[in-house]
Structures are given as C-alpha cells and as structure tokens.
Amino acid sequence: ETGVTQSPTHLIKTRGQQVTLRCSSQSGHNTVSWYQQALGQGPQFIFQYYREEENGRGNFPPRFSGLQFPNYSSELNVNALELDDSALYLCASSLDRGEQYFGPGTRLTVT
Amino acid sequence: EDKVVQSPLSLVVHEGDTVTLNCSYEVTNFRSLLWYKQEKKAPTFLFMLTSSGIEKKSGRLSSILDKKELFSILNITATQTGDSAVYLCVKSTGFQKLVFGTGTRLLVSP
C-alpha cells in the first residue's frame, strides 16, 4: 500500500506566475483535500474533491482551482501568484470522506 | 468564522515531565475532534474523539473530549525528546472539512 505523495517537494515562483501542484492519493482512496499552511500557522482548508467533483471549499479566491482525475490523483492550480501564497501546501486523501492521511507537502516560495 | 483555539502556543519541558495541551472549539457542524502531530511536514494522526468523557490512550499519550464545555486535552506523560513537535487540534465538520488550530509547539529538552 503506497501512501500519499506530492510533487514537487519545493518550488520557487515569482509574483504573477501560475503554479500546479500534484498529489497522488493513497491506494483505494477516492477523496482528496488540499490545505495551505503558512509559517507558524495551522493548515487552512482550501477545497476537497470527492469522486472527481468539488465537495466543499474554504475561504480562498477563485484563482485557487483544482482537479481530480479518474485515478483520484489531484492537482491544485494557483494563478496570479502573490507573495502571501508562500506556504506549505498539504494534500490529504481519504476513503469516502473518512479519516484523512496527509502527504509530505509542497513548499512554495513566491518572490 | 469557525475557530479552534489551542493553548499554550509553545512549551518547553524537560525529559520525563508530563504535559497537558488544551484545545477549545466552536460547536457549529461538529463531527469529531482530532489530534495530529507535525514534526517536519506531514501531520500524523494521533486520536479521533467523538464522545464525551471517554479517554483514548496510545502509549504515553492520552486524550479526552468534553462536548458540553467544548474542549479537549492531550496529555503526554514521561516526555521524551522525540515528542518534540507541533501538536495540532482539529475539528472535523459534517462536510469532512478539517478546521485546524494554530498548534502547540512542544520542545522536550534532554
């Protein structure tokens, strides 16, 4: 059984650029949730995908968008990057919206 | 705004000490209360609490929920340096959205 994996591990972008982060869910899981964790803060819920449909969204602007594929892997896209988007982005997978298992995260730095 | 409040924000103890971490939450859409440990990156699951007054234990860690007073505590006895981490208290809502507290940063010195 493979755990949740994320890529890339680290990423540096400049303001105004666009970024795509990837998450492979744990084997057998059909739900992926994305979180943003700023330095010194707890993770903040961005959105959740369940069976390829968005299933709830936190307080993030529309330039944060996502996708879930038929194999239940997922992407997080952020357009028009701002300095405040610098954070650790965590994805978590679960089965039928149950207990969530976290990936190692992608650290995004926006300069 | 849905909030989970943890205290203290940080804590330094000596090996062998016992610590108690506190968490309070709002009742809106409450489904369960979770505790996670975050050392480097990925939070790792410790406990899920759904019923009041029933203590969950795992080795030196234990946790309990009070749904009347809307709080939970996490206890760690005989602390070790490997317990140094950020401990996150999390409220799970009916939509499986997790609301995280800011965490308690625990440092256990040898």
Image (cartoon, rainbow, N blue to C red):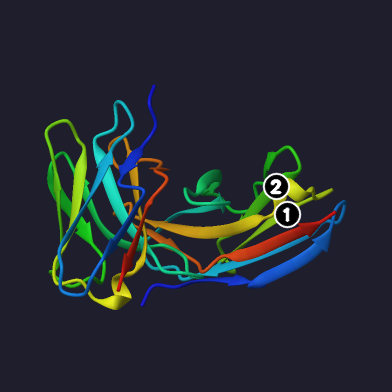
**Is B100 positioned to the left or the right of A94 in the image?**
right
Q: Give the residue at x 52% y 44%.
A: B45
- Give the residue type at disc 2: Ser
The local secondary structure at tag 1 comes to: strand
- Give the residue type at disc 1: Asn
Q: Which mark is residue B62?
A: 2
Quarter where residue B28 is shown: bottom left
Which chain letter goes with mark 2?
A: B
Outermost residue toward the top?
Answer: A1
Q: Give the residue at x 70% y 47%.
A: B62
| Sooner in the amino-acid sequence: mark 2 or mark 1 | 2
Percent position of residue A56, x then y: 21, 58
Which chain letter goes with mark 1?
A: B
**Is B82 positioned to the left or the right of A16 in the image?**
right
Q: Is residue A102 above or below residue A28?
A: below
Percent position of residue A45, x then y: 32, 61
Tell me if mark 1 has few (under 14), some (14-19) or many (20+) residues whose alpha carbon lies within 10 angstroms of its own.
Answer: some
Q: Is residue A40 above or below residue B49?
A: below
Q: Which mark is residue B61?
A: none
Q: Which mark is residue B75?
A: 1
Mark 2 and mark 1: span between their CA atoms?
Answer: 5 Å
B80 or A95, which lies in front?
A: B80
Q: Give the residue at x 65% y 53%.
A: B64
Percent position of residue A25, x then y: 29, 36
Quadrant of the snapshot with the N terminus of chain B: bottom left
